[in-house]
Amino acid sequence: MLGGGIPIGKVFGIAIRLHYSWFIVFMLVAWSLSVGYFPGEYPGWGLSVSIIAGVVTSLLFFGSVLAHELMHSVIAKAAGIPIRGITLFIFGGVSQMGQEPKNPRDEFRIAIAGPLTSLVLGCIFLAIWFFLKGLPETITAIAHWLGWINIFLAGFNLVPGFPLDGGRVLRSLLWWRSQNLRKATKIASNVGRAVGYVFILAGIWIIFQGNWFNGIWLALIGWFLENAAVSSYKQLDLLEKLKMHKVVEAMTTDCPVVPPETTIERLIQGNILVLGRRCFPVVNDNGILGLVTIHDIKLVPREQWTTRTVREAMTPLNKLKTVGPEEDLATVMQILAEENINQVLVVKDNNILGMVARDNLLTFLSLHSK
């Protein structure tokens, strides 16, 4: 859902990205603070002071959002859940977890960590505003706004609308009571959809009251929540179905291999263009050595195709994600998502048995659903 984005670094080993939509909301927040809030609350400030305060406050606000998401991710990593990264986007931020929590306790701890972080930050900023009156007015004014907005952020995220934090807290409690993750997710997802529809209707009502901006914004948040609730349940439902099937059921065994001494030019002319395949296992008498894909080939300069070999261009086996024939298909789906790859080799005793690609999974599921 949030593919792409601009990487800006890592915190605690977790990659941070800015989605392109983030720049829109950053400018909107900075603009509303600079020309609306600060001039209205502090009319003695000049325009330049209001603009600087607006930009700084907007940056610190998204720093607070990042801290909120970081705490989710840190707790998730401590529970053994892989984190693909954190993305800040138009509706705030999202921690992209590689898999669902393993039990209700982990779910609860991960979900509640974000709102608690926002609440603590809100109290810290309000304490700065209340107790440190000797600081320059611009600093206390910024702290005052950040204090209340963080407390609002904590409260908003505790709304029991899955996949908001409150919805995940609700799911953890339902999961603990029923011991059925799928059932708990369905109930929490339906509550999340209902919350989304309430936001949409409230947004429409506000629009008819003449407040177009706030009404449209609230309706968009509701639309996003409703879609996210549906997508979250569908994703879990898909994984639960895939857990019931093994790799051997969906893998393709017609998997042409190439020897490591093959030149890239020969691979292209004799294999890729003829067979229409995008990837080939590299194999010698001792077994599989690696995998060469069109992506690997693109990294080699065109003028070197006649002299460079497949062995030089391939991704070695020790850097590949592989699965065994008896593993479940949910594992394959998680690997494809976590590694952002299109296929996984099926290997046993260093011998290639086949391959599972994204289209294999989609075809397999389509046939079984019919």
Image (cartoon, helix red, strand yellow):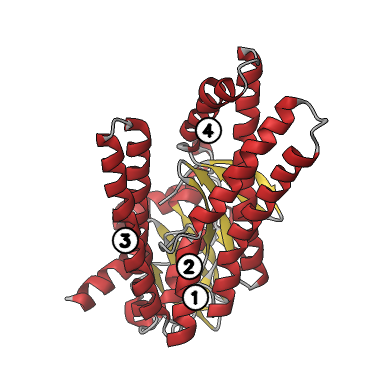
The reply to whether discs 3 and 2 touch (Cβ–Cβ < 8 Å) is no
The reply to whether discs 4 and 2 touch (Cβ–Cβ < 8 Å) is no
Label 3 or label 2, whichever comes before in sequence order: 2
Q: Give the distance between the C-alpha atoms of the residues marked 2 and 1, in whole angstroms.
A: 6 Å
Q: Amino acid at mark 2?
A: Arg
Which residue is label 1 attached to?
A: 172
Residue 37 higher or lower than 109, as above or below: above
Q: Position of residue 142 (x, y in %)?
A: 67, 33
Which label belongs to residue 193?
3
| SS category of the residue bearing label 2 | helix
| SS category of the residue bearing label 1 | helix
Q: Nearer the viewer, residue 79 or 298?
A: 79
Residue at 58% x, 61% y is: 83
Residue 62's image quarter? top right
Q: Position of residue 172 (x, y in %)?
A: 49, 75
The reply to whether discs 2 and 1 touch (Cβ–Cβ < 8 Å) is yes
Which label belongs to residue 168?
2
Q: Give the distance between the C-alpha atoms of the residues marked 1 and 4, in whole angstroms.
A: 33 Å
Q: Position of residue 232 (x, y in %)?
A: 38, 64
Residue at 44% x, 72% y is: 332
| SS category of the residue bearing label 4 | helix
Residue 269 higher or lower than 330, as above or below: above
Q: Nearer the viewer, residue 365 or 220?
A: 220
Q: How many circles with numbers are drawn on the protein?
A: 4
